Image (cartoon, rainbow, N blue to C red):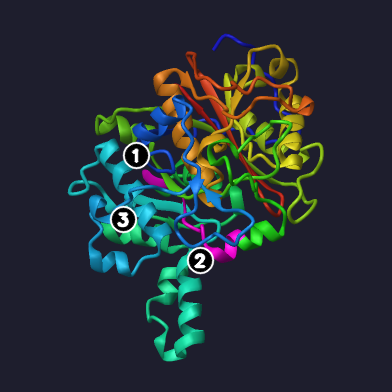
Amino acid sequence: MSAERKEPKAGVPRRPRGGRRVVVTGLGCISPVGLDAAASFGRLLEGRSGVRPISHFDASTFDCRIAGEVDGFDPANYGIGVKDARRMDTFAQFACAAAKMALDDAGIDLSRAPHDRIGVSIGTGVGGLQVIEKQQERLLKRGPRAVSPFLIPMMLGNLASGHVAIRHGLRGPNLHVSTACATGTQAIADAGATIERGDADVMLAGGAEAAITPLLVSGFSAAGALCTSNADPAGASRPFDRSRTGFVMGEGAGVLVLEDEEFARRRGAAILAELTGYGVSSDAHHVTAPEEGGQGAQLAMRMALARAELASEQIDYVNAHGTGTVLGDIAEARAVKQVFKEHATSGGLWLSATKSMTGHLLGAAGAVEAVICVQSIRHGKVHPTINLNDPDPECDLDFVPKEARDRRLQAVMSNSFGFGGTNATLIFQTY
């Protein structure tokens, strides 16, 4: 790239010289706007919302009655039999489906692959809340003997990675991270680091979530975090708009196949993009509210830039965290302005918010958005931020409102920020 490289700030680690390069070779996605990566990306480009009235339970008495639900998912279509499906919470089914699609997309022949060198890193923010609520109801109505013996393996978050590894016989590192809304992004970062240091040649990485349940909707509503524009589901999620009132819950899963570059080239893989940068940090500020200036978010972005050895002006596009909360959107916009300076306001940097159409997939959000970033690189297209009709003056950046745009993308960034002040950033580049 022609732009001059800038030295990273003191204390920010540089990407190790001579380290293994990590490339993306496969994508899998289950989302409120599509049941695979291609369909999801296509509908995002069209500006089609997946937010609709909640159907998973009777929400008629709830303040919030809308969500980004996955429509038409059948585990049998992804090789998950009826017996296995009954013993898996939906988040694990989503993870297995997305992982299968990613493996198929990568074209890895598992009958010949070194299973000891292939691992899994799939996180979830909430885990098996569906089964917890159902089994609690059984306990209260029918007593302890009515509780399923599969409750524990169905509720544990690490069983997303566990089921994927078991189904495909993958004996490499088996990781699980749960960092709220940064989960999927951090799981991918951890997988990339695992390959860089030589502990695996291939990692299936991402996040999965299926927590649109009475308890969680009630909890987020009680915290004042959810949008209650029930009369207009498609227009409810409004990141960076002056009229935003909160986020809309969503569900789904995203999985990427990451490989050591040399391993991928030896097997003749089609390389979709390269994971060149990642950064993780903490606000160390508040359990739910972001730090006003986005200091922690700035640190994560700067760490990712330093590891990728890129100057901020070399980033073409940022997939924003953009949830639609009043404080969160402002903090993110401020952080972006601090990191990107003039590049953020001169028209060179584009941003968009996937959550304006999918809702907030919690622990799966960053993983699905990473899939979208790779698709954006592959196709040279950036999806819009819908419902951005009256931008907040504090969020005066180019969020690609209303309609998709074409652009040859060399380097893209994806941001995820979670409760507890946890921040994670990824950078993907053309290969």
Residue at x 64% of width, y 56% of height: 63
Where residue 108 appears, as percent x and y from the top left, is 25, 41
The amino acid at mark 1 is Asp
Sequence-wise first label, 2 or 3:
2
Residue at x 22% of width, y 48% of height: 110
Magenta residues?
201-217
The amino acid at mark 3 is Leu
Taking depth in this image into account, of 378 and 146 the one nearest to the observer is: 146
Where residue 390 appears, as percent x and y from the top left, is 70, 25
Q: Regarding mark 3 in the picture, which secondary structure is present there?
A: loop
Residue 214 is one of the magenta-drawn residues:
yes
Q: Residue 241 occupies which quadrant of the picture?
A: top right
Is 41 drawn above or below residue 172 in the view shown?
above
Residue at x 62% of width, y 62% of height: 218
Spatial CA span between label 2 and label 3: 26 Å
Spatial CA span between label 3 and label 1: 23 Å
Q: Regarding mark 2 in the picture, which secondary structure is present there?
A: helix
User: Badge 3 is on which residue?
Assistant: 170
Q: Regarding mark 1 in the picture, which secondary structure is present there?
A: loop
**Count of numbered tags:** 3
Q: Residue 214 occupies which quadrant of the picture?
A: bottom right
Where residue 366 appears, as percent x and y from the top left, is 53, 42
Where residue 178 appears, as percent x and y from the top left, is 56, 57
Taking depth in this image into account, of 252 and 134 the one nearest to the observer is: 134
Taking depth in this image into account, of 364 and 269 the one nearest to the observer is: 364
The amino acid at mark 2 is Leu
Disc marking residue 36: 1
User: Badge 2 is on which residue?
Assistant: 129
Residue 307 is one of the magenta-drawn residues:
no
